Image (cartoon, rainbow, N blue to C red):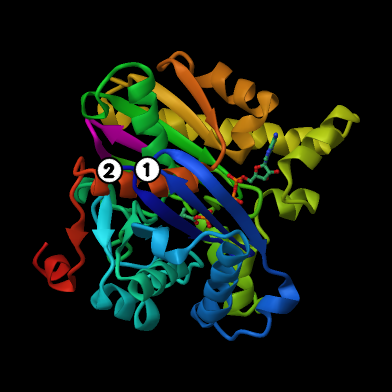
Amino acid sequence: MTYRVLAVNPGSTSTKFAVYDGENQVFAKTLNHSVEELSKFKSIMDQFEMRKNEIEEALKENNIELKSINAVVGRCGGLPPVKSGAYLINEEMIDRLNNRPTLDHASNLGATISYSIANEIGVNSYIYDPVCVDESGDIAKVSGLKGLDRVCLTHALNTRAMAIKYAKMNNKNYKDLNLIVAHLGGGISLNVHEKGKIVDFVSDEEGPFSPERAGRLPAKMLVDLCYSGKYIHKEMVKNVRGKGGIVSYLNTVDAREVEERIANGDEYAKLIYDALALQVAKSIGELATVVNGDVDAIIITGGIAYSKYMSESISKRIKFIAPVEILAGENELEALAFGALRVLEGEEEATIYSETDFIKA
Ligand SMILES: Nc1ncnc2c1ncn2[C@@H]1O[C@H](COP(=O)(O)OP(=O)(O)O)[C@@H](O)[C@H]1O
Ligand SMILES: CCCC(=O)OP(=O)(O)O
């Protein structure tokens, strides 16, 4: 039987969704939400009805019957640390996301929208590899200041999908490999997969800056800035997430525009872009130490991985560690759909989400 899956990926300014028949994408759409449209809502979760209705309308307009769908799968974020793979969405998860999210992230709507659509048609809904996937041990959590543990937040969905894809492409088993994966998108994060488990990470707050995030900053200077009286809390958060990174230096979040400026001789744009490549390379080097240098491959993924300039700038610094594979794009809809398909086909089992499991763990 070929299963039909609806995959839903809400981002801060868009909702991407697609329908897959088995591994074939039969429909995909990106709904762009204007600042004006989003400004009507007090919180991200209040956008639920609007985004869900727009998905259902688009499916209807394109003659895709809701009833033909066998499962719905969404991206997710704001849960306590979870293991990788699929979780069955239930009331407990929805309650957590609506009332006590651990992270205020648009991807939380991936779960609430998927659950609601699935309930309308009487099928299961799942989240797959949410950003809070955490398989690292105690040693990875030590930050250097008691009470301020490191938090594993990475682009788990795309990075894990690309790690699995790399293994398949090379006729190897994901669970036999040590892989470092760098996701270079609007946000940048990296993780290291040791024999099928994400054992350590560099989150988007701890490593390279990115088009819209500041990444690691000098700690004392940051504290001084917070207390300088120049900014309120909300503004400082925006300075590091939204208005930090490339956009703070070059006033654009579009890496393609940065490259155009470099091609036109802009030395300052080149300095910033080269610094980004250096920071990504340094984080890859850092993660290689987690597995004592025993790295089978380094994978560079995300939208910026389409850039030959960036891929080459990073590769030349890290290829002494392991072979470098470029798997460009954010690939998240495919990762969601393929994950749900593995569950439907019995290759993987979905975990039932339960808060008591976290308390015991
Ligand atoms: N061909 C390309 N060359 C360089 N950068 C690119 C290219 N295509 C997309 N990008 C950049 O990728 C970034 C977005 O990456 P993506 O993984 O789609 O991110 P997100 O989903 O986090 O917004 C943007 O900065 C965009 O300019
Ligand atoms: C690093 C956590 C995941 C995340 O922030 O995702 P986006 O870059 O898609 O917002």
Pointer 2 local density, CA inside 10 Å: few below 14, some 14–19, many at least 20: some
Instruction: Determine if the C-beta at disc 2 is less than 8 A from ligand 2.
Output: no
Task: Give the residue at x 60% y 32%.
Answer: 305
Q: Is residue 204 above or below residue 109?
A: above
Vertically, is 257 above or below 78? above
Relative image position of residue 121 (x, y in whole percent):
36, 71
At 33% from the left and 76% from the top, the residue drawn is 94
Residue stretch in magenta: 191-198
Q: Cβ–Cβ below 8 Å for labels 1 and 2?
A: yes
Q: Position of residue 187 (x, y in %)?
A: 56, 50
The answer to which image quadrant residue 286 occupies is top left
Farthest residue in the right direction?
264
10 Å neighbourhood of mark 1: few (<14), some, or many (≥20)? many
Q: Nearer the viewer, residue 137 or 19?
A: 19
Q: Is residue 273 above or below residue 100?
A: above
Instruction: Examine the image and state in which quarter residue 191 appears.
Output: top left
Res. 342 mark: 2
Measure the C-alpha gap from mark 1 to mark 2.
6 Å
Question: Nearest the camera: 19 or 186?
Answer: 19
Marking on residue 228: none
Relative to 48, 30 lies left or right? right
Quadrant assignment, res 266: top right
Rendered location of residue 90, percent (x, y): 25, 72
Q: Mark 2 belongs to which amino acid?
A: Arg
**Residue 194 in magenta stretch:** yes
Residue 230 visible somewhere in the drawing:
no
Q: Which mark is residue 338?
A: 1
Q: Which three-letter amino acid code belongs to the residue tagged 1? A: Phe
